[in-house]
Image (tube, grey):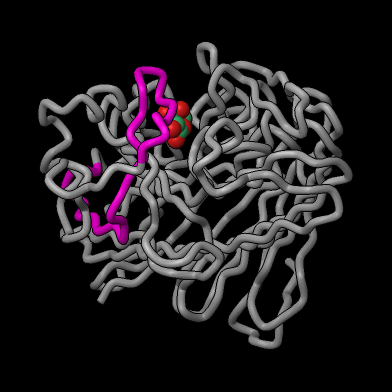
Amino acid sequence: MASLGRDLEMHMKKQPFGKTAAGEAVDLYTLANSSGVEASITNYGGAVVSLKTPDRTGWIADVVLGLNTLDDYLKSPFYLGALIGRYANRIANGRFVLNGVECVLARNNGRNALHGGVRGFDKAVWAARELPGDHPALELTYVSQDGEEGYPGELTVRVVYTLNHDSELRIDYSAETDKDTVVNLTNHAYFNLAGEGSGDVLDHVVRLNADRFTPVDAGLIPTGELRPVEGTPFDFRRPVAIGARIGQPDEQLERGCGYDHDFVVNGEMGTLREAARVVDPKSGRVLEVLTTEPGIQLYTGNFLDGTAVGKSGKPYGRRSGFCLESQHFPDSPNQPDFPSSVLRAGQKFHSTTVYRFSAP
Ligand code: GLA
């Protein structure tokens, strides 16, 4: 066990997690802080495999959906806890035009490209390095080749996961390219603040710092409109249970089979601000999400179907977890009025998202 950092109560542990079909060795890194929070992350897809946090009585539970073995991850279609890129969420018809040239992407979601294509960053083995410092921090690096899944430019991506004293799991993303390209990076953790495998998340109470959202067409591609949430089941400006309105007759909810929509985070993109706050009334656990990104996708696990069996042996059924994926708006490369997701050659991309846990 390798101990890092000046605080002796903080440490990082590394253990083998298995081998990919190509024989690449993959590890599991466990970051722990002095308040009893522990995060395990694998360099296969950079996935957060487990995240243990105390409830209001001090009882520890694992609050993310995850799988026991690397083999299970290799077979899973659900992006559990993974890093997503080169372009998180959907690009319509798997194509876009950049500098007058059409880029044709791998299509893996009907006609659309989803989460980076057939082999997105969630399926890559990332180079891993423990970073020295006061807090346990894991640096993951992946070099995506020019033309990979159809995206132009060799993109070097660096993601740092840091677990700090305040029980925040902070994710810093950066990227550089040698040709103009598009980038949208996120993490696809599914949370259940009552503990993974404990049923659905419909009782969780959500507040979103968003006056508008991006309505979608039948293929879950944004129409381009930034629609006010006022008077819709998408109004989470005051805390509301996920399940309170999810079954209402509403065209947008029907298209998403529940919530599967991007919200426009109020405030200035590029500044770290609150995007979401979720409370599990039973355990008292609170998750706050802060991000520098312009949007946050609330996805209520509508496509989980019980085929993935989780760490504690329980199947992950529909809505047994929710995702809050900080990101640029879906299909930005085809939406001139959305904040640009273009990264120019030589420019540096940076974004930060913080998942903060408490149980007041
Ligand atoms: C996302 C998408 C969903 C679904 C999941 C993965 O968050 O928005 O529609 O594809 O990923 O199952």
Residue 206 higher or lower than 133, as above or below: above
For the magenta stretch, what is the residue range? 201-225
Residue at the location (75% across, 53% down)? 175
Q: Position of residue 356 (x, y in %)?
A: 42, 68
Q: Quadrant of residue 234?
A: top left
Residue at the location (31% across, 56% down)? 210
Judge by depth and name the residue closer to the eye, 154 or 29: 154
Taking the magenta stretch, the answer to whether it contains residue 202 is: yes
Taken as a whole, is the magenta stretch helix, strand or loop? loop
Q: Quadrant of residue 284?
A: bottom left
Q: Is residue 356 visible?
A: no
Q: In the visual, does 137 lie left or right of 152?
A: left
Q: Position of residue 143 (x, y in %)?
A: 83, 43
Residue 114 higher or lower than 320, as above or below: above
Residue at the location (27% across, 25% down)? 257
In the picture, which quadrant includes the N terminus?
A: bottom right
Judge by depth and name the residue closer to the eye, 192 or 122: 122
* Residue that sits furthest to the top in the current view: 110
Q: Position of residue 33 (x, y in %)?
A: 54, 75
Q: Position of residue 346 (x, y in %)?
A: 86, 54
Judge by depth and name the residue closer to the eye, 344 or 57: 344
* Residue that sits furthest to the right in the current view: 178
Taking the magenta stretch, the answer to whether it contains residue 356 is: no
Residue 89 higher or lower than 76, as above or below: below
Quarter of the render that holds ligand 1: top left
Q: Is residue 21 visible?
A: yes
Q: Quadrant of residue 87?
A: top right
Q: In the visual, does 244 lie left or right of 326?
A: left
Residue 254 higher or lower than 312, as above or below: above
